[in-house]
Amino acid sequence: MLELLESGEMRTPFLKFGDRVRIEMLDPEGKSVFGAIDQVVARA
C-alpha cells in the first residue's frame, strides 16, 4: 500500500502460485538462529 500511496501505482508484483518464499535469520557468525522456513505458494 505504501507504493500505491506514494506513487499512485503498485510496482512490486504480488506472490503467485509456484513462487517460493524462504525466511531465515543468521547470527553474526552466519549460523542459523531458528532454522529456515521454506514454502511454495500453492492453491488451497
Image (cartoon, rainbow, N blue to C red):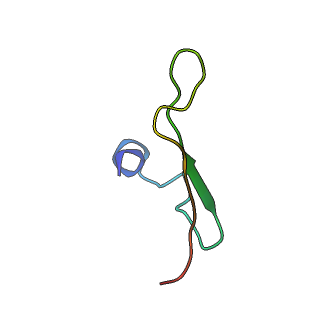
Q: Quadrant of residue 38?
A: bottom right
Percent x, y for residue 41? 56, 69
Q: Nearer the viewer, residue 44 or 17?
A: 44
Q: Where residue 12 sits: x, y (%)? A: 54, 52
How many discs mark residues in the rendered view? 0
Q: Position of residue 20 (x, y in %)?
A: 63, 59
Q: Nearer the viewer, residue 12 or 18?
A: 18
Q: Please give the name of the residue rendered at 56% of the width and 76% of the height, measured from the top-left corner.
A: 42
Q: Considering only vertical position in the picture, is 14 above or below 23?
A: below
**Residue at the (53%, 28%) spot, across then down:** 26
Residue at horizontal 37 percent and vertical 41 percent from the top: 6
Residue under the point 52% across and 42% down:
35
Q: Relative to 44, does residue 41 appear above or below in the rendering?
A: above
Q: Which residue ends up furthest to the bottom in the rendered image?
A: 44
Q: Is residue 42 above or below residue 29?
A: below
In the image, farthest residue toward the top: 28
Q: What x and y, as percent, mark residue 40?
A: 60, 66
